Amino acid sequence: MNSHENKNKFESNKKYFTISVYTVCVVLVSTIGIRAIFNWKETTSFLSILIRKLSPFLVGAFMAYVLLPLVKYLEKNIFSAYFRIRSKKYCRFFSILTTYLLVIGLIILFFIFIIPQLAKSIYDLISELPSTEEMKGWLNTLESHFPNFDWALIEAPLNEALPGMLSKVTSILTNLIPLVYTASVSIVQWLINLIISIIISCYVLSDSKILARNCKKLLHVLLPQSKYYSLMNTLDECNHIFGGFIIGKLIDSLIIGTICLIVLSIARFPFAVLISVIVGVTNMIPYFGPFIGAIPGFFIILIVNPKQAFIFLFIILVIQQFDGLYLGPKILGDSTGLRPLWIIFAITAGGWAAGPVGMFLGVPCVAVIAYLMNRFLDRKLTEKGIVLPDNEK
């Protein structure tokens, strides 16, 4: 009787239990993925709403991620080493406070000096826009200087498109600044979200060590020791690639925008502030950024002084050569490790997925994916005992 009962008694099996858990997880994830793909519009709508609601937390976390290296530097080299503050809590507090005072100071300087100049540049640009008659007179002047060129090939389509194009450009520029005032509700909401993001980033920076320790505890529980250390090394390298590119490119673009402003101001170029801001912002996009920034600057200066417009292209070429050959490698090094083909692919795919922000973030994301893929392939080759020559990898 006892032997019969023992046969019918349920006995736990850790191996089969683990397989069952993995099977349930795979089925669940596959079901959610298939449903998301077949209801793509609902999925994108849900994701956009979710991102909008969580945007203060996402922005706050990103701000903390970008500012954390500066906080660590101030904590270690200034408040701990120089001021010799013993308490780690006070070191972290003063480091965070100093970091945000620096950031807020830069923002205040931007609003005091840059924003009024941008507004003035836009108003001046509107007043400098030529009329249709002035454009035709300019073409007649070119005809007198180059009589052998068949200008009819240009005049016919230009005369048809010019009035509509000029009126559209004038309308856009005229309504650009009034739109700021009509969007007051959105600005207030944006400021509220920004304040919430700053508060969240302060808490993340303050508790970054606690958060990291809790994550390590969880990984220690879930993974074997060998897997844990391998995963930590991988995450450290991914953080080095992604964070190194983001922070380095921000610093690089700030320096390039400042150099452009100084050079254009010394040379007395029109709209120096507006053009330098465009050059600095677009410089964050690798490879294509300099060209994207140079094109609007060229046409803006062309309206006022065609000769200076071509000089501007030469100045941008010199600045970008300095950035590509000296400044960029000094700041960024080989932070991504990507070949030019993959950088172009990352910019194109990122721009298609998320516009200008995607063009900026696409490169570090693809760099991280490429690193993980290379690590996986190298491990598989090592397991098979295959060693490829360097020129075949």
Image: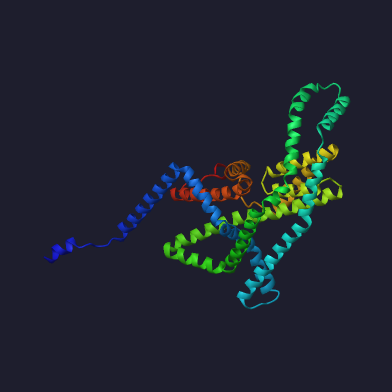
Residue 358 at least partly seen = yes
Q: Is residue 1 above or below residue 43?
A: below
**Is 2 rendered above or below residue 247?**
below
Q: How many marks overall?
A: 0
Does residue 352 appear to the left or right of 123 in the view shown?
Answer: left
On the rendered structure, is 112 left or right of 38?
right
* Residue 351 percent coordinates (x, y): 61, 43
Q: Quadrant of the N terminus?
A: bottom left
Q: Nearer the viewer, residue 317 or 54?
A: 54
- Among all residues in the image, which is located at the extreme left? 1
Question: Could you tell me if residue 310 is visible in this image?
Answer: no
Residue ranking furthest to the bottom: 86
Residue at the image point whose x is 53% and y is 58% from the top: 235
Q: Horizontal and vertical percent for residue 135? A: 82, 31
Scheme by which the image is coloured: rainbow
Q: Position of residue 369 (x, y in %)?
A: 54, 49
The quadrant in which the C terminus is found is top right
Instruction: Choose top left, top right, bottom left or bottom right for residue 79.
Output: bottom right
Q: Residue at x 57, y 47 (%)?
A: 366
- Where is residue 86? Give x, y as percent: 64, 78
